[in-house]
Amino acid sequence: MLLRFWTLAICMSASALAFCAGSIKLTAHPAISIADGYSTVTITADVRTSSGQVPSDGTLVRFTTSAGTFRQQDVQTTSGTARAVLVAPTIPGVAKVTASATGVGIINSIDIEFVKDRATLASLNQYIEIDSPEYLAYFPEIDTLSASGETELPKIRFKDITIEAKDLQVNVSTMVVIATDANLRVGEKTLECRRLRYLLNRRRGSAIAVIDGRAGYYVLTAAEGTLSDNGMPANEYEFADIGVASSSVHANRAVIFPHREVQFHQAELYVGDTKVLGMPLYAIRPHSDSGIIGDQIVSFQNDALVLNYPYYVRLSPSFKSVLRLRSGQDYGRGATASSGLFMEWENSYMKGDTMEGSFTLTGIGRDDMGINWRHTQRFDDRTSANASIDFPGFRTLYGALTLSRAFEGFNMALSGTSSRSLRGTPYETQRLDFSVTTNMQRLGDLPLSYTVGLTANSSHVVYGPTTSDQEGAGLRTQFVLTPQPLWTGANLTASATLSRLWGKNAGDDIGVIGTLGVATPLGPNSSLRVSYDYTDDSFMSSFMGKHRVSGTYYLDAGNVSLSLFGGTSLDIDSTTAFVDGYWRISSLWRVGGSFTLDEYLGIQYRDTTMFLGYRLGTREIGVTYSLDRQKFGFQLLNVPIR
């Protein structure tokens, strides 16, 4: 297997093709945070030219977000990397972060999830272990894992819960198990079930079983059953139809992290009934909409062979080590790909819900080779820390540390970042933030909650001959509106943060950050969200204007799919828009396109790409045409490796 890996690397280095302006890869640390109004997420943008090289220092990268605020939205690259710190919103949800480098002609986006509290955050590291020597298969299109056995029964383990059954399915998203002829064990208590439906993370479910000599439909708490008088709901124990899936991963062991990945031992990858690849170890992102091979290993897009080939050195719930070969990566929207060949060594580790992190060696063998380290430590239920170190191209050193502690009635947070260039343009930044904030409290009988706190900030920036310093300390209060129903299914949300700082270059006015949003369904298959954001804060360096309006729209109506995202500033020239959609004309043909617009102070990046796809069994051949570049492209998805 290792020989195949290096052989493929040599072959690919001579055959990778691409056309476009460049690529921009976005990562976030931490990947998921708390919607408390003061936690931070560092967004890192790695920019490359169309040849896969690092652009010149000072290339401007502009960051925007649909939720939360950036401390600085326009950041210049050093050694091909730009970083921006996103301050969490006060309302849980997903923030769409967009980064654009108009000098390279590329734009990309990433979704950052913000959860309601620390308990929810800690639960994201929970995992499910499944062993099934006879049959085990995961179907990414329906997000379902199926297992069965006659002589060696499949076994599920989750914390102190064990389920053995002749036939079972696990929904990866919901952690719901459906099983026949099952044995449920929770702690020391066991229960034999003819049929079982069990929600693992809630320790609740239902069963058709015999308890104390009485057969019937039982509602379960842990492994204790209560006979139901309401009757069994229809389709309670119905298995998902795996026949509709076009691709699958077969293995004898799987480990499911519902929000992160699914790991496999002795994996065999199938497209339809055709085995396309075998690996002793393999991992896949859950909730994948397209075929495994086309999406995650190899495809041909926009006249470029796109490769993401992993060789897993070690794979377990607590530690993962993988060598990854990338080429022609499409880190961007529209007709994009980067022709460079990249080798990476990725290592990640985890210990329960107390510790997790990663260490990565990037660009092995290239002149932009670098390292990065990420670490999260939860000392107890109330205290946590995030740390990171980046050394891109061994030209720039970046470090960040955040400490947070929840006390009785209030929270305390301390964060610091520091970076400096070791070669090239002289560059140096330091920033320190400290806050003490009360817990959210209800404001009388009003549908409002609020916090009051103390905050202190200090920043120092040197770029070439330019130096900037800022210091301040003062008060900050937040107000959050309880979601208000407007009409059926529609809700109004709002929040505001007011701050007053005193100090060097801290400004004389009250800082205001506010957002107002409306979300509503538009029929059974579509939804719309519109929001207005106001930002006027001396410590939130804003090049995007004070007033900004944004919106998202989704439509999924069988043969028609459409998604729109747009945002525009009302007081300066700044607009971002994404449109993606398709119409399935028949079972074989579909037509669609994408539109990307990023405009700032007269500088515009625009791409309109149309495509026509034809389905060949479980594969799709597509022809694309970029209206702006007037170029045809070719896409071949779900390509078997033989």
Image (cartoon, rainbow, N blue to C red):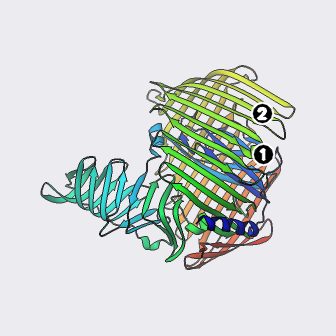
Residue in front for this viewpoint, 437 or 54: 54
Judged from the image, the secondary structure of the residue bearing numbered disc 1 is: loop
Q: Distance between the residues labelled 1 and 2?
A: 13 Å
Q: Residue furthest right?
A: 465
Locate the C terminus and report the quarter of the image it occupies: bottom right
The residue beneath circle 1 is 79
Q: Is residue 8 above or below residue 21?
A: below
Q: In which quarter of the image is residue 507?
A: top right
Amino acid carrying label 2: it is Glu
Q: Crowdedness of circle 2 by 10 Å Cα count: few (<14), some, many (20+)?
A: some
Q: Residue furthest front?
A: 3
- Say which residue appears at 55% left-offset and 76% top-offset: 618
Q: Crowdedness of circle 1 by 10 Å Cα count: few (<14), some, many (20+)?
A: many
Is 480 on the left-hand or right-hand side of 136? right
Q: What is the x, y in percent for residue 292?
A: 55, 67
Q: What is the x, y in percent for residue 312?
A: 56, 58
Q: In this view, does 1 lie above or below 604?
A: below
Q: Which mark is residue 20?
A: none
Q: What is the x, y in percent for residue 430?
A: 72, 30
Query: How many numbered marks are there?
Result: 2
Judged from the image, the secondary structure of the residue bearing numbered disc 2 is: strand
Of callouts 1 and 2, the N-terminal one:
1
Q: In this view, does 188 lie above or below 295?
A: above
The residue beneath circle 2 is 428
Locate the N terminus and report the quarter of the image it occupies: bottom right
Amino acid carrying label 1: it is Ser
Residue in front for this viewpoint, 148 or 6: 6
Q: What is the x, y in percent for residue 418?
A: 70, 33
- Say which residue appears at 29% left-offset and 69% top-offset: 151
